[in-house]
Image (spheres, helix red, strand yellow):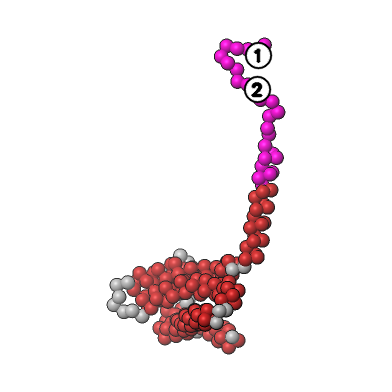
Amino acid sequence: MVVCFLFATIWYTVLIFGYSCQNSFIYFSFQCGTLCYLKNSQVLTHFENAIFFMFPLSIIVIGNIILIIHVFIQKRQMKCRHQLGLWRQNFRMISQLMFIAILYMSICVPSCILLIMGSYARNNRFQSWAANVRIRYFTHLKYLVIFGYPFMVLVGQKELLQMIKRCFYAFGRQLWRTRWKNQTIPMTIVPPMKHGSTLM
């Protein structure tokens, strides 16, 4: 973990501040344009894509697939041993892991496919389209993964969900009472007068 952090820190620090190139900022473009070392060196671009995106994504996808297969194997073994009660107790944690894995792979795997189509697939009519879609949409969709993790964990917390429901119920009930309390209700109701009649 520390090695990965130090490697990424040194890599970007050296290339951003130490690489001899002239940055040309495009203020109407995403992130003011591409970093100059990525535009000047295809080797650095391919290395960065492979080491910082494709390789970790491959490990995560393979790990998630192995985890899901292992979960189903464990379920089958517990069923044979008549230990499904233990499975039901751990089902909430398993569902959280599966939801997180599905959320991550649903964004990052298509982004990786678009990266391959836009950068490495030559003579492809979808090359410009893939690069454009990845830059415009999937670059921002990664934040959906980051901010979606807490909600995925929240789905599996039954006690916390019950507490949130009680809070919303109490708030809605108080709001309803305040609304009726502030409403003016007349004490007397005057019956409608017929045509040509008077009160006297």
Residue at which label 2 appears: 190
Q: Is residue 116 magenta?
A: no
- Disc 2 marks a residue whose amino acid type is Val
**Category of crowding for the residue at label 1, using alpha-carbon neighbours closer than 10 angstroms: few (below 14), some (14–19), many (at least 20):** few
Q: From the viewer's perspective, is 132 left or right of 98?
A: left
Q: Is residue 100 visible?
A: no
Residue placed furthest toward the bottom:
3
Camera-side residue: 42 or 181? 181
Q: Main secondary structure of the magenta part?
A: loop
Residue drawn at x 57%, y 79% as measured from the top left: 83
Which residue lies at the image location 42% right of the left edge and 76% below the top edge? 112
Is 5 or 19 nearer to us in this picture? 5
Q: What is the number of the mark on residue 7?
A: none
Decide if residue 3 is in sight here. Answer: yes
Residue 184, percent across and down? 68, 34
**What span is colored magenta in the figure?**
175-200
The quadrant the N terminus occupies is: bottom right
Q: Does residue 183 appear left or right of residue 14 in this picture?
A: right
Mark sitting on residue 199: 1
